[in-house]
Amino acid sequence: MGVVSAPAVELVDVRKRYAGGAAALDGVSLRVEEGGVLVLLGTSGSGKTTALKTVNRLVDPDAGRVAVLGRDVGDWDPIALRRGIGYVIQEVGLLPHMTIEQNVGLVPLLLGWSEERRRARVRELLTLVGLDPDRFAPLFSRQLSGGERQRVGLARALAADPPVLLMDEPFGALDPLTRRRLQDEFRDLQGRLRKSVVLVTHDVPEALRLGDEVAVMDRGRVVQSGTPREIRESPQAGFVRDFVAAALP
Amino acid sequence: MLALIGQHLVLVLVSTGIAAALGLPLGIAMARRPRLARALLGVAGLLQTIPSLALFGFLIPLPFIGGIGARTAIVALVLYALLPVLRNTYTGILQVDRAVVEAATGMGMTPSQRLRMVELPLALPVILAGLRIAAVVSVGTATIAAAVGAGGLGTYVFRGIATMDTRLILAGAIPAALLALLTDALLGAVEKSRRPARAAAILAAGATVVAALAFTAGASRQRAVVVGSKNFTEQVILGEIVAAALEDRGFHVDRRLNLGGTKVCHEAVTSGQLDVYVEYTGTALTDILKRPVRSDPGEVLEEVRAAYRPLGLRVGAPLGFNNTFALVMRRQEAERRGIRRISDIAPHAAVLRVGLFGEFLERQDGMPGLLQTYGFRLGVRPREMDMGLIYPALAAGQVDLVVGSATDGLIAAMDLIVLEDDRHYFPPYDAVPVINEARLARHPGLAAALESLAGRIDEASMRRMNFAVDGEHRAPAGVAREFWARNSSQAGQVVPGRVEK
């Protein structure tokens, strides 16, 4: 075995219980290799979003270890940690009172970039996600279609060129055609950018299409993890097989 | 009129501004701490339930924030405006979509950046709605401010109520209502504008300029003598006469007439916010000093003088009339029955129908003592009626004898007579100027100028002036000036009881 570099994101036996509820995370361990895409796949309430939020400390675990770029998240200043992680969420992620340009340029603004540099970066990113900057920069999110909004969300997450991306149902609210096209574009983009990505979805085909690794979660636990091929061809008996079989023809 | 609108605007702008400056940070703190929110909303809600006149009453005796004038009014208006500002800031921030707030946190905003860049901008419409309510409520409540001498459009309303002059009431009420509608429309436009924050800033800047202009226009007469009065016709006339007498002698006078009542005036003159107002010796003795009733006018005056001295108040020479209780009859009826004095009633006591205001039945200088002193019993149960209805009922023959005040204007106008109190039952209510001793030094010649009023006004003159205002709807200032012009030059004094032409 050679030298093993630290994983970009690592969860070790993480536990979280919300007040008065069942365990949201019941001993979850995950690894995202640098430049890899880990998909957390599960039904709603399986704990996948909670697991994601432990990475940028929107949720603090009761027990276990979460590390980003080899460093325990408890040792990071939470503000610096979050600015170093791109965060993409479904729909509501865009701030309704800000223009597209202001939304995309937000993290660079928080990081203190000059206006000139921010503006250039916003143009670059909008172009990258396939939106015409001249047309879209001055608009508000309510003037955009669902697909356009998701592209803006991705552009915003990439704005400060973070090494790690967290994506929570990024294509969740889209029609099947748009969804498919954005998935393809994301895969293409990821091929060029090589970010370390944690992506949460309940959509089995999406998970199998986008993930380098897929971790299937159920009731706060990872019940099976492996490559998409392993999940498709040898799903574990019980929950994983039912879930995958129900979704694939 | 313009000056009053200016004062009104200053009151509203300053108080809404202070309420915003206090309410916004508190509302934000409340959104972070639910326990604080419950406590503050409770307190602010409680304040809201206090009737405005009562709140002004509480504030007057307080040091620093109290007294009469704009300061007290602003404190009260701020207390009222606080609830809508607090509540809307608080709920405005809480109703911001939690998912949006979490997204902002997830992007690495510090709590203060989140507040500034996300929560406040998204809560702005609700916060502005709160400010709008606060401002509109303040426009209305500020009319009450006239009761504590803060001026504003309420000055007309109160004077109109005191003199039962509907036109005067409307002269205050209609501009106040228009002002409220205008405020509502302006702030409503800000709320709906595409850049509400910028529009609010522009409006705030404009309002500050208006307030500053109105303030500088209103702030003058620093060295003027401040003359007060209570809130009924006779008091306003007396205030105007005192003012006219002082102006005759070259003083500048700041009129704070129509103040909320005896207590307001007393507190104000004691604290030096008024230099002088006219009080009645009987009222000073029983109402202010809480001492038992006495009947000798000279003794009452001396007792009040002695008791006022330690308060820093000087009681001037009586003005000449005694506004005591009076038993009043139709002249014809009285002559037919041969009644001139109260003791003449006894033979007719079984059949006379008496009308009076309810309070008289219980007062320590009221009905029981009267019957005891004169030794008769009424055969017909007295009818209680509203003050305003007593004389119409007497004129219409529904009652034969009423209890009123010696200077009621209608006595002169309706051919009524006042029965002589031959056993001196009623305590004296001699009108006397009450002066803040410490302020005399600041206005050399003030004491002498006030002495020039001594013995100048008798009951008949006072009645006629009251009637000129209440019955003929003339302005108190005009009536007072006319009276003073005729009387100031006379060498002699009016002899009490003698009716002059």
Image: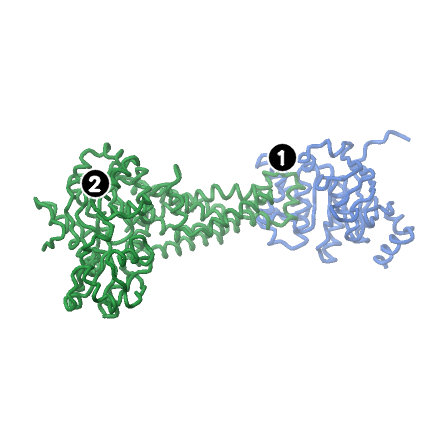
Residue B204 screen position, x and y as percent = 43, 44
- Amino acid at dot 1: Leu
Residue A73 screen position, x and y as percent = 74, 34
Residue at x 25% of width, y 36% of height:
B223
On-image quarter of the C terminus of chain B: bottom left
**Among the chains, which one is blue?**
A
Chain letter of disc 1 in the image: A
Calculate the distance from the C-alpha at mark 2 to the C-alpha at mark 1.
Answer: 75 Å
What number is the disc on residue A111?
1
Chain letter of disc 2 in the image: B
- Amino acid at dot 2: Gly
Residue at x 73% of width, y 54% of height:
A179
Left or right of residue A167: residue B371: left
Q: Mark 2, residues whose alpha carbon is within 10 Å: few (<14), some, or many (≥20)?
A: many
Q: Nearer the viewer, mark 2 or mark 1?
A: 2
- In this figure, what is the number of numbered marks? 2
Residue at x 68% of width, y 50% of height:
A150
Nearest the camera: B498 or B177? Answer: B498
- Asked which secondary structure carries label 1, the reply is loop
**Among the chains, which one is green?**
B
Q: Name the residue under label 2.
A: B316
